[in-house]
Amino acid sequence: MDTRQICNFAQEINESCPTMLRIGKQRLKCKNCQDSFMAKTNVVDKYCSIAKAVKHKALTMLESNVSQKDVSKFTGVSPSTIGRLLDSDQVLLRFNSRTLPTNIAIDEFRGPQGKYCFIIVDNDTSQIYQILPDRLKSSITHYFDRFSLKERKRVKSVSTDLNIYYQGLVRRYFPNAKLVVDRFHIVSMLTRAFNQVRVAVMKQFDPNTREYRALKNSWRLYLLKSTSLNYTKAYSSLKSCHFKK
């Protein structure tokens, strides 16, 4: 079976029919220069025994929130290899698509070995669109440079956090997109500011007073929505507390 036949056969393989290919490595010799070289195939990468289709399937499963252990069982590849695959540059290059979702979200998360990764999510479907192996400026710009200006102009909105660098990135690459700040980060910022004020007021009282204890121990109560409060109930931690205006 020659290389072209193997490639055509490999494309027909699907998960309902697990198949193992035994590929013999042929060394060819040039009659003119007498130099020798190894025959190439599109089924596997050089110096690798795992088919490209298997790698692609593993990455696709990982996008669907399947654990590395389950992916390992399904594909027959060791968990450590799955981890290396997730941490490799193939995550950056696995999509051949040159199109972008209309509404996207960008953020970062702690990936394998504690390294931060850059993630792009399709906001319309809540599906992961792309994961970059790091959050370096060079990697992010290199990725978005793959898309034409016409394609990037199609993006209508980009959700992100309060990171100034990401905001500049959105304005640079998506001229027609509305910049949407993720409400989680807004609520988080307001909560921190509120707690700073609460602690500052609390420190104005003696630690042995009811006012001090009410401000310290009932911090969860102050973060509740107004609709979650019971206005007919007397909260024990707030009894006999008289705050000056």
Image (tube, grey):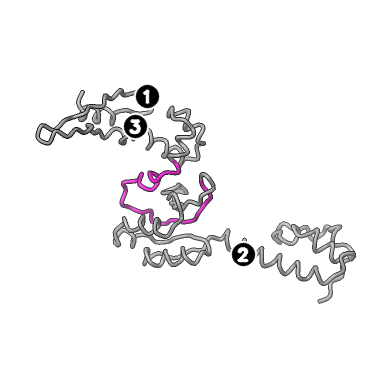
Amino acid identity at mark 3: Ala
Task: Identify the residue at horizontal 43%, vertical 61% (top origin).
Answer: 157
Task: Identify the residue at horizontal 43%, vertical 65% (top origin).
Answer: 178
Direction from residue 71 to residue 195 in the image, left or right: right
Q: Which residue is mark 2?
A: 189
Q: Which residue is mark 1?
A: 18
Disc 3 crowd rating (10 Å Cα; few below 14, some 14-19, many 20+) is some
The numbered mark, 1 or 2, whose residue comes first in the sequence reads 1
Residue 66 position within the rendered picture, expressed as x and y whole percent measured from the top left: 50, 37
Q: Which residue is mark 3?
A: 51
Q: Which stretch appears magenta?
A: 86-111
The numbered mark, 2 or 3, whose residue comes first in the sequence reads 3
Residue closer to the observer: 43 or 186: 43
Quadrant (top left, top right, bottom left, bottom right) of the C terminus = bottom right
Amino acid identity at mark 2: Met
Residue closer to the observer: 164 or 235: 164
110 drawn magenta: yes
Task: Identify the residue at horizontal 69%, vertical 60% (top origin).
Answer: 225
The answer to whether residue 179 shows anywhere in this view is yes
Amino acid identity at mark 1: Pro
